[in-house]
Amino acid sequence: MPYKAYVSLKAILKTLYRVVISHKHLLEWTTSEEAEKQAKTDVFSYYNQMAVNVLAGIVSIGIGFLTVSPTAVFLGVFWAIIPTIMWYISRKIENEQPIDKLNDKEKEYVLEIGKRTWSFFETYLTEENNYLVPDNYQEDRKEKIVPRTSSTNIGLSLLAVISRL
């Protein structure tokens, strides 16, 4: 039985019991936000909530061995490990910033490249060039600038200016 169906069935039965038999705790309720906060997110709680799946898996494995059916054994194993898979794909992903993965030397290197890249755009993205960076610039030979541009260079210029803001 899926977890949501289990929760719904539990809520229905609890409500019927309180309304028809006990007449107590009739106004007791929990918001979905509170329920999410209280929900356990460890692998054992997934197995607890999906116990029917695990039981079906064990039965299927047993039937598979008795009838020599690899399909039944495969399905049984799959059902038995489903809670682990659900726990794994449902866990919270820690959002670590990419810059936090770099050490100090690497951060220095990236900043230096950024400064040099911006320096290029700052030098050649001028009114004399109609605010278009040159298509061909040779740094290692005789300094020569070709007065044409490309759509790629225009895009790079826009990104450079936006990233500088």
Image (tube, rainbow, N blue to C red):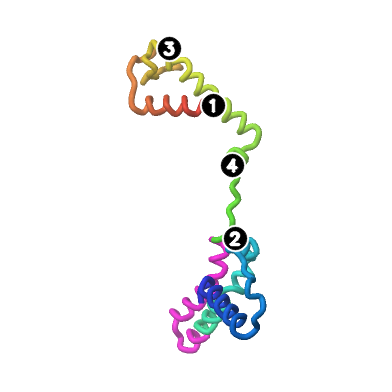
**Residue at point 63%, 65% (across, down):** 39
Disc 2 and disc 1 in contact, CB within 8 angstroms: no
Q: Which quarter of the figure has residue 153?
A: top left
Q: Find out whether the residues at labels 1 and 3 contact each other: C-beta distance under 8 Å.
A: no
Comes first in the chain, label 4 or label 3: 4
Q: What SS does tag 1 mark?
A: helix
Identify which residue is drawn at 61% across, 41% down: 101
Point out the frontmost of discs 1 and 4. Answer: 4
Give the x, y percent position of residue 45: 63, 70
The residue that label 1 is drawn on is 113
Sequence-wise, the earlier of marks 3 and 2 is: 2
Kindly indicate whether the residue at mark 4 contacts the one at mark 2 (C-beta within 8 angstroms).
Answer: no
Q: Mark 4 — residue?
A: 97
Q: Compare marks 2 and 1 and give the one earlier in the sequence.
A: 2
* Alpha carbons under labels 3 and 2: distance apart: 64 Å
Can you give x and y, in whole percent of width and height, for residue 152 in the image? 36, 28
Mark 1 or mark 3: which comes first in sequence? 1
> For the residue carrying disc 3, how many other residues have a C-alpha within 10 Å: few (<14), some (14-19), or many (20+)?
few
Which residue matches tag 2? 33
Q: Which amino acid lies under the numbered mark 1 shown in the image of this protein?
A: Ile
Query: Which image quadrant is residue 50 in?
Result: bottom right
For the magenta stretch, what is the residue range?
Answer: 62-89
Three-letter code, disc 3: Glu
Dot 1 or dot 4, earlier in sequence: 4
Label 2 vs label 1: CA separation?
46 Å
Q: CA distance from mark 4 to mark 3?
A: 39 Å
The label number, if any, that marks residue 143 in the structure image? 3
Q: Residue at x 62, y 85 (%)?
A: 21
Q: Residue 67 in magenta?
A: yes
State the residue lying farthest toward the bottom.
66
Q: Residue drawn 62% across and 29% down?
A: 108
Mark 1 vs mark 4, CA separation in Å: 19 Å
